[in-house]
Image: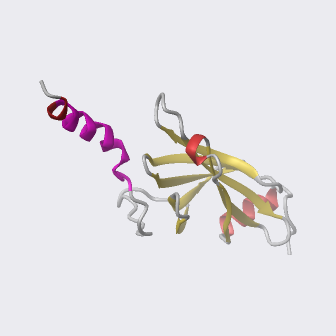
Amino acid sequence: MRFNNFFAPIGLMALLPALPLVMADDCKIDPPPTKKYDIDINFCFYHDYGIVDVRLEIPGANLKPDHVELPAHVKANASPIHLDETYEVDVYFKNDWTRAHRWEASIPIVGPTLYVDLETRIVRSNCKLGLKLHITGTGILGRLDESINLTELDQDGIKFLAQSMGLCSTE
């Protein structure tokens, strides 16, 4: 067997993980028709940071006695690392920025890792739920350190729960 005949298929298989299989390309929110939420949010954030593009989507929230459940969907592409996950994030109300959930994707053995953290807090002055995204990495993504203030959710159910816990003013 000649080297060229062997190398072409092996080289192609090695390059497959580098193809962008997950594209965080737009902000269309398509919640399943059977899924109902206590609070409709329909929040979507997308940005391309050059080395990584990321999209966060939160279609709604469910109120619990001491926290809020957010079905957060993250797509991130830092080729050859791809992340496409939905997770029910439990947000416990605090006035300081707190990590609500960390998504992690890496290439086994080789080692670069992409971290996407969703951080939350209750803004004491207006009783809104603040959302922030923090993107970091290791290995070839080691210099990646972006922190993005996303939005402040202004829904009555969230305000009522935060006020009942004494985390913000009742004005």
Horizontal relation, residue 150 to residue 108: left or right: right
Q: Position of residue 64 (x, y in %)?
A: 64, 49
Residue projecting furthest to the bottom: 171
Which of the two residues, 152 or 85, is positioned nearer the viewer here?
Answer: 85
Residue sitting at 42 percent across and 46 percent down? 80
Looking at the image, the residue that sits furthest to the left is: 1
Foreground pick, 106 / 160: 106
Vertical placement of residue 5 versus 17, above or below: above
At 54% from the left and 46% from the top, the residue drawn is 88
- Tell me where the magenta segment starts and ends, as one range: 6-22
Residue 10 magenta-highlighted: yes
Who is closer to the viewer here, 14 or 25? Answer: 14
Residue at 43% x, 51% y is 79
- Which quadrant of the rendered structure holds the C terminus? bottom right
- Return the x and y of residue 168 as percentages of the image width and height: 85, 64
Q: Is residue 91 above or below residue 113?
A: below
Of the 4 image quadrants, the one containing the N terminus is top left
Q: Position of residue 9 (x, y in %)?
A: 19, 36
Left-right relation of 134 to 108: right
Residue at 25%, 41% (x, y): give it. 12
The prevailing secondary structure element of the residues shown in magenta is helix
Q: Is residue 163 magenta?
A: no
Residue nearer the viewer, 117 or 59:
117
